[in-house]
Amino acid sequence: MIKRWQRVLNQINRLIDFVIVGASYYGATYFWLLVVRHDPSNIALQPKNLFIFALIFAVASIFGYQLAKLYDSVRGKSFNFDIKWVLFVNAVIVLGGGALLYLFRLIDFSRAALALFYLLSSVLVLVKRLLVRVVLSRYRAKGYNLKHVVLVGSGALAQKYKNTILSAPQFGYTIDGYIGKPDSMGQLPCLGEWAAVGTKVLSNIGLDEVVVALELEQTALLPQIIAATEKYGTKLSIIPYYNDYIPSSTTVQTLGDCKLLSLRTTPLDFPGNALVKRLFDIVTSLILIVITSPIMLFAVIGTLLSSPGPIIFQQTRVGKNKRLFQMYKFRSMRVNAEENTGWTKTDDPRKTRFGSLMRKTSIDELPQFFNVLKGDMSLIGPRPEVPHYVEQFQETVPLYMLKHLVRPGITGWAQVNGYRGDTSIEGRVKHDIWYIEHWSLWLDLRICLKTIFGGIINQEEVK
């Protein structure tokens, strides 16, 4: 039943996406050439050309969405998955289309219309997918279109899985019963022990999936369970007994006959993602250096007049892979003996009045754009700390050193969520690790926008 519903839904999804993409091309082309440019004679508006290009883009989009697995079940995936891949696929298609127009010298076909088409089709497809998610979630929460599961196990892991399913009916899973010790899973029906009912349960036509949640001492049953599910062609999922130690970013690598679980694989471990982020850093920092050069000149003059000492304050910080580097800032304090170990506070007496103004408006951070160009830092990432405090936090703050898996940043997920200056280290680390595990270019853009529209001015007082 579930599979039939899934196939029907997928076909409807493809058809709607096909119509949306094709209509978006028509709408973007008409709007740009007729409303904006007032060019009704443009050959791109000829019915034949409109139809051919709309058809090409629509077919290419459906093919791209299929490769990105956007038509697979999304029960356990967040909407960020949809955003990421719809924007990526549409960008590839539009950039490819623009390149072909340039290659064949089709100058009458507007690149601006393609950009508008990208925005329009992306928004409409994502809105459609969001509406589908909402409708399906409510539909499943009422008990329809459910995926039937049998749970193997009756210990703490099985309890955790049961509680997860019961607390999230919108995912559309229902546990028909469990195989394990009687009277150990509350109101959930006990189907018996594996030896007695295993193959009988698997022969049930209405069963969609078997979830195995065995404790360490029960793992000897795994070979039997796996063999039985393969015999009956039943989908099998396993919750390992070390579940609580596995982060969401775990990946599996193969080394000969050995399967290795890489517990801390991050999106930036993949060369393509790392290249995208580095190019984004280089291009954006160059642009920002040019834009903020008048402000930096103002900071140079103000720093010179505020107190004796160098204009640029260099301090050793810990970067990616625990490598040390010199981080640049406009000097906001008087030269002092504690500049490499003293913790900066809101009412720090070492600050100059002009330094307080720079720190209030984050102007003192502008030289770090040059750290980004050098490759010591990124625009977005965990804030780097001095070695003196890294040594302390390594011993007292759980998971603190994981922030050094990526380049440190000028701003970051922790900072735009209020963790700036003298705030909770545990809170910062929690947000930094979440950022590292969920990195995407879209997330970096969100953080940039949140920094510009709320993260530049901080809570420090100018004294």
Image: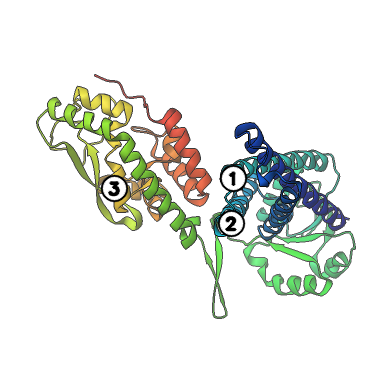
Q: What element does badge 2 sit on? A: helix
Residue drawn at x 46%, y 62% is 271
Question: How does the figure colour the protein chain or chains?
Answer: rainbow
Amino acid type at image mark 3: Asn
In percent of width and height, residue 183 lies at 79, 52
Location of residue 132 (image quadrant):
top right
Could you give the CA–CA distance between mark 3 and mark 2, rounded to whole angstroms?
34 Å
Disc 2 crowd, CA 10 A, few/some/many (<14, 14-19, 20+): few
Amino acid type at image mark 1: Ser
Q: Is residue 414 above or below residue 14?
A: above
The tag on residue 110 is 1
User: Is residue 279 in view from this perspective?
Assistant: yes
Disc nearer the start of the sequence (2/1): 2
Could you give the CA–CA distance between mark 3 and mark 1, rounded to whole angstroms?
39 Å
Disc nearer the start of the sequence (3/2): 2
- Which residue, given by chain and number where applicable, does mark 3 sit on? 371
Q: What element does badge 1 sit on? A: loop
